[in-house]
Image (tube, helix red, strand yellow):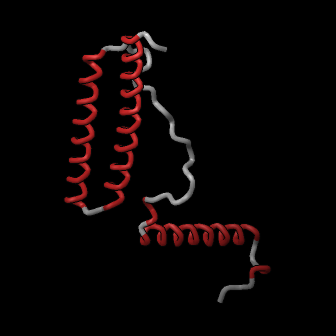
Amino acid sequence: MIPPLENQSLGRRVVLTAALLILALLLLAMIGWLSGGWYEAQGAPFEQKRVTYIYEGIALDAALLELDKRALEEAYHEQAKRLFTVWLTTQEPKYFTTGIRRAREAYHQAAEQIARREDELRKSHTGSP
């Protein structure tokens, strides 16, 4: 039988408390892992999304901008194919969902910047501000 807590030494109390805390954390981790929440963050993101300016310091070029648009379409298509391959082989939705979300965010960000560059080109050719 375990003696009452008040009859135990301070060192033994500390070890017992630490062991109970570790056990509680492991139990919570196991619950998160078994429920599928281990890979998904339901709370607010820790960092705000950063906007990357992909054309910073790059001169305007109409012909290359058309190639950039085509490359963006092809790159998105290739990434989507890879993600569907992962889905078909693993059937783990977390990888597909996270990957397709990131790919779409990056696609839209790049497409917006390409559209801005096209506007800049149009304005430079028409001379309007």
Quadrant where the N terminus sits is bottom right
Q: Quadrant of residue 55?
A: top left
Which residue is more in the foreground, 5 or 23? 23
Q: Is residue 122 above or below residue 35?
A: above
Which residue is found at the position 22% from the left and 47% from the top? 82
* Side of 16 where 111 appears, left or right: left
Which residue is found at the position 57% from the left and 47% from the top? 46
Which residue is more in the foreground, 12 or 18? 18
Q: Quadrant of residue 9?
A: bottom right
* Side of 82 where 94 appears, left or right: right
**How far from the left and from the top, in percent, is residue 71?**
24, 30
Instruction: Check the image and name the residue furthest to the bottom.
Output: 1
Which residue is more in the foreground, 126 or 88? 126
Which residue is found at the position 51% from the left and 40% from the top? 49
Which residue is found at the position 71% from the left and 85% from the top? 3
**How far from the left and from the top, in percent, is residue 32?**
48, 68
Instruction: Check the image and name the residue furthest to the right.
Output: 6
Which residue is more in the foreground, 71 or 27? 71
* Side of 26 where 115 appears, left or right: left
